Image (cartoon, rainbow, N blue to C red):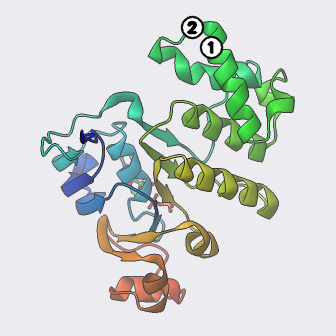
Amino acid sequence: MPTTVDDILPLRIRDLRYAPSGREVLAGVDLELGAEGITLVLGPNGAGKSVLLRTICGLIRPGGGHIEWGGTGQGGGGLPGHRVKMVFQHPMVLRASVLDNVALGLKPLGVARGERRRRAQAVLARVGLAHRAEDSARQLSGGEQQRLALARAWLTRPRLLLLDEPTASLDPSASAEVERIIREIRTDGTRILMVTHNLGQATRLGDDIVFMAAGRVCEQTPVQRFFARPQSEAARLFIQGELPWKLAF
Ligand SMILES: Nc1ncnc2c1ncn2[C@@H]1O[C@H](COP(=O)(O)OP(=O)(O)OP(=O)(O)O)[C@@H](O)[C@H]1O
């Protein structure tokens, strides 16, 4: 039986460092992501969670360390193109229709215009925005814009999706809808690494938790064990609401 070599996962990160102007923002991050599931990144403000995601997707160049993509054993830190996508707390929305905003995701892949629009329409139906396809994207609510951003990322069937607080500005019902979409994207075969400050959301969505403080990963633990018996003192204080809002670097 032929074996498929996964060019993205597992993802192995070793001793990742980033110190702009000499201040350590990532102070030696070790992390491993297996082939499936949803990993939630928790930690206090300033822990380096967003910087870690931006470094993984190539928006920030690390000062040191190693990112190894996939099961080939070949590392080097190069990003394997469109197979890794990131969605931000405030999504980028162009002055164009909802459909064109989503179809845009397929343009770099050389997909013909008609096919781009057909696939965009199909993914819009999956995020509940099919009826808004021809509306101006800038007229969408915050929750709808976030669903648009998820649709644009989902359209390309990424192997790994990085989500930086995608529900931080949303009300509970809009958040619940985004959580439903995230679960569907995962079921479709996309690995998810997501930052959140919402502990309820972490228990609802997460398979495991990566807890960060002061630019390091303190622990990576299955979700139920994390909340019942965190391994690190920093995580225990964080769960109890007693960790200082920002740890000194
Ligand atoms: N592009 C950047 N270049 C240099 N420093 C940065 C950059 N982005 C963030 N920082 C700094 O790195 C530190 C960690 O920021 P980061 O946004 O990763 O924290 P976070 O854990 O995501 O916090 P929050 O929960 O508040 O979003 C902060 O002190 C921030 O000012």
Could you tell me residue 45's position as x and y percent?
Answer: 48, 66
Residue beneath the point at 12% across and 46% down: 73
Whether label 1 touches label 2, CB < 8 Å = yes
Mark seen at residue 100:
none
Identify the residue at image location x=53%, y=15%.
107
Q: Position of residue 21 (x, y in %)?
A: 25, 47
Total count of labels: 2
The residue at which mark 2 appears reads as 112
Rendered position, 32 above or below 129: below
Q: Where 103 sits versus 224, above or below?
A: above
Picture quarter containing residue 124?
A: top right
- Does 137 appear above or below 127? above
Query: Does the Cβ of the disc 1 residue fall within 8 Å of ligand 1?
Result: no
User: Helix or strand or loop: what does disc 1 sit on?
Assistant: helix
Residue 15: image quadrant is: bottom left
Quadrant of the displayed image that contains ligand 1 = bottom left
Q: Which residue is mark 1?
A: 115
Image quadrant where residue 141 sits: top right
Residue 145 visible at all: no
Task: Please tell me whether mark 2 sits on a helix, a strand or a loop.
Answer: loop
